[in-house]
């Protein structure tokens, strides 16, 4: 056998051995993972991890929330306890809106400025001790101008003292399930043990969005007070910079850095974004827009009715009218991944008839939103109008009409 044949045989043997070794290695890898197509020894990435990896932010803590359900759609360090500067005023405004709703105060109240309120530094409208201003202008000054002096004046008007109001703030936070929040003042000025988390603040913002007064004052971009001698410009520039943003509150201190809690609505989908601790000027706007872009690109709204929209009519017995409109007590909607709307359906749970008398806004039923057979949201249904009870004579007349 010549040398050429020997070399050829050796090369052939080496090639066969290489193929056998590679095949064994592949088989061993498949056996190690227990599932084809995965990397040996690597942990499986969860959906949440994949979602978080798809969006980065310079904020120390941030969340994206579905406003309709309160579900967190994306987050970074959502429970991290951080100072929030003037974003604090969202809770101040929540308590004010609740006091208005309960009739404890009115927009026409004259709020008298104390020396304590006058002494506040930072953002202010330069209230003087003894000066009076309407509650409405005070709330606008808080929401638009982030006025610390107005915040304390309102707090004292509602609770009697700033300290008593702070106690109300902390009690309300606990009621809302906020486990990483503590307030030391109604302004957000630097103070010991004054902090929140992105998730907690999103919960607080979601709560106050139920009040039209908050939505109204928070959406004002420019407002004149003192007969036009003092002009307020909203610190939330996203009202002009980002389509759909209609409420929120900014904050900044050296300790808290730049913060923003905001909400935006497009095509029936309302999202809430909170960023805490972004590093440089305007970064809270940039990061919020980035988070909203992510949310609106990935999610769409399953929407059955907006707050106040008529859902059905229901028969009324023993009333001055035969039926009453039933309206949604909140938005009947939720964020779902794009392309999955067909998996959701709604069901109105209402009696066949309701006995008068009925008050306007009285709960008469519920609307249930279902994903397959699983309940994912339940919204109260309210009587659209007041219905008085009919007189006995009128009831007898209606009964005779039905017989004959």
Image: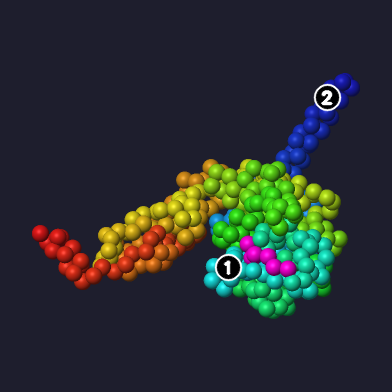
Q: Residue at x 47, y 45 (%)?
A: 342
Q: Quadrant of residue 387?
A: bottom left
Viewer-side residue, 114 vs 66: 114
Mark 2 surroundings: few (<14), some (14-19) or many (≥20) residues within 10 A: few
Q: Nearer the viewer, residue 117 or 30?
A: 117
User: How many callouts does the rendering have?
Assistant: 2
Q: In the picture, which quadrant includes the C terminus?
A: bottom left
Q: Position of residue 353 (x, y in %)?
A: 29, 63
Check residue 70 for magenta coloring.
Answer: no
- The mark closer to the camera, 1 or 2, is 1
Q: Label 1: few (<14), some or many (≥20) within 10 Å?
A: some
Query: Which image quadrant for residue 85?
Result: bottom right
Give the residue at mark 2.
8
| Element class at badge 2 | helix
Could you say whether the residue bearing mark 1 is in a helix, strand or loop?
Answer: loop
Q: Is 323 in front, or is 45? A: 323
Q: Is residue 398 left or right of residue 302?
A: left
| Residue drawn at x 54%, y 67% as measured from the top left | 101
Q: Position of residue 392 (x, y in %)?
A: 21, 71
| Residue position for label 1 | 106
Q: Is residue 158 above or below residue 123?
A: below
Q: Name the outermost residue toward the right.
A: 3
Taking 396 as reference, is 118 left or right?
right
Q: Over which residues does the magenta segment extend?
A: 131-136
**How far apart are the alpha carbons under marks 1 and 2?**
100 Å
């Amino acid at each position: 056998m010549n040398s050429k044949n020997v070399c050829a045989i050796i090369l052939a043997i080496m090639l066969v051995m290489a193929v056998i070794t590679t095949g064994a290695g592949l088989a061993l890898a498949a056996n190690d993972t227990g599932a084809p197509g995965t990397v040996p020894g690597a942990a499986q990435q969860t959906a949440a991890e994949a979602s978080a990896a798809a969006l980065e932010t310079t904020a120390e803590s941030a969340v994206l929330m579905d406003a309709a359900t309160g579900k967190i759609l994306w987050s970074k360090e959502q429970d991290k306890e951080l100072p929030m500067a003037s974003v604090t005023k969202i809770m101040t405004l929540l308590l004010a809106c609740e006091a208005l709703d309960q009739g404890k105060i009115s927009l026409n109240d004259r709020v008298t400025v104390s020396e304590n309120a006058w002494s506040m530094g930072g953002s202010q409208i330069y209230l003087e001790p003894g000066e009076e201003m309407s509650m409405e202008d005070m709330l606008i000054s808080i929401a638009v101008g982030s006025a610390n002096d107005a915040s304390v004046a309102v707090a004292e008007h509602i609770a009697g003292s700033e300290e008593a109001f702070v106690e109300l703030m902390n009690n309300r936070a606990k009621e809302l399930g906020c486990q990483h929040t503590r307030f030391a003042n109604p302004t957000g000025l630097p103070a010991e043990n004054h902090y929140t988390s992105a998730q907690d603040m999103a919960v607080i913002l979601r709560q106050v969005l139920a009040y039209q007064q908050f939505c109204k004052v928070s959406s004002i971009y420019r407002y004149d007070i003192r007969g036009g001698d003092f002009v307020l410009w909203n610190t939330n520039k996203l009202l002009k910079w980002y389509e759909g943003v209609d409420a929120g509150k900014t904050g900044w201190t050296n300790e808290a850095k730049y913060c923003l809690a905001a909400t935006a609505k497009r095509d029936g989908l309302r999202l809430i974004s909170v960023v805490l601790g972004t590093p440089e000027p305007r970064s809270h706007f940039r990061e919020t827009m980035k988070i909203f872009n992510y949310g609106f690109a990935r999610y769409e709204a399953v929407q059955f009715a907006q707050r106040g929209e008529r859902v059905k009519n229901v028969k009324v017995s023993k009333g001055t009218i035969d039926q009453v409109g039933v309206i949604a007590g909140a938005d009947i909607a939720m964020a779902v991944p794009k392309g999955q709307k067909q998996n959701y359906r709604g069901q109105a749970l209402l009696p066949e008839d309701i006995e008068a008398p009925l008050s306007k806004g009285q709960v008469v039923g519920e609307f249930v939103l279902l994903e397959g057979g699983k309940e994912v949201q339940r919204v109260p249904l309210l009587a659209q109008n007041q219905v008085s009870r009919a007189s006995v004579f009128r009831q007898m007349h209606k009964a005779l009409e039905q017989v004959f």
